[in-house]
Image (cartoon, rainbow, N blue to C red):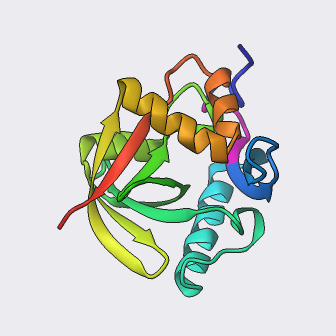
Amino acid sequence: MREPVAQTAAHATAAVLHVSATVDGRDGGGFRLGLGTVGAMADINEFNRHLIDEFRTNGGKVSGPFGNAPILLLTTTGAKSGKERINPLVFTRDGDRIVIIASKGGYPTSPDWFHNLVAHPDVRVELPGETFEAKATVVDGGERDRLFAAQAALMPNFTEYQEKTERRIPVVVLDRVA
């Protein structure tokens, strides 16, 4: 098992997920996810704010490392604070359902947005050209494995993230609420 990207939250740097298009050799295409680092949590927040603004200004289109990736904005309610939190995330689809993975780049703990949606599963999803309410469900067993494998086939780093951590990386399905 490889070392996690960062050992503790006390590290001076934090991992930032970025995505770029590549050919992965299996099916002739896909997205290659990678990790970069930035100095402080404020830098991550600024990066996310810029990405959110660009997504909303350009109808879901973004440039830079996320330029060719399927991106959504997920709005959760803070588990402790009760405040609205917005996170840009890569996703895949399983029929009408949207699938997101709480990888945190292979870090030993799940991302804050995951804890938020477990505490408050009613979320808002922004896709290019549409915004809707959804119910978040953490899936497990064979369904978790199937959905994880499908996303990892398109974005191979998810397999690497799982190898970097001892935790079983959660998979979440977002179902539109009518």
Which residue in the rendered view is the most extreme toward the front? 27
Residue pictured at 39% horizontal, 42% vertical: 172
- Indicate whether residue 61 is drawn in magenta: no
Which residue in the rendered view is the most extreme toward the top? 1
| 176 or 110: nearer the viewer | 176
Q: Main secondary structure of the magenta part?
A: loop
Residue pictured at 51% horizontal, 20% vertical: 167
- Indicate whether residue 10 is drawn in magenta: yes
Against 132, is 155 above or below? above
Q: Is residue 80 visible?
A: no
Residue pictured at 54% horizontal, 84% vertical: 59
| 60 or 24: nearer the viewer | 24
| 158 or 25: nearer the viewer | 25
Which residue in the rendered view is the most extreme toward the left? 178
Residue 37 in picture, x, y percent from top left: 77, 46
Classify residue 78 as left or right of residue 61. left
Q: What range of the chain is rendered magenta? A: 9-16
Q: Is residue 82 visible?
A: yes
Quadrant where the C terminus is found in the figure: bottom left
Residue pictured at 47% horizontal, 28% vertical: 145
Classify residue 7 as left or right of residue 88. right
Residue 168 in picture, x, y percent from top left: 49, 22
Residue 20 in picture, x, y percent from top left: 77, 58
Classify residue 60 as left or right of residue 170. right
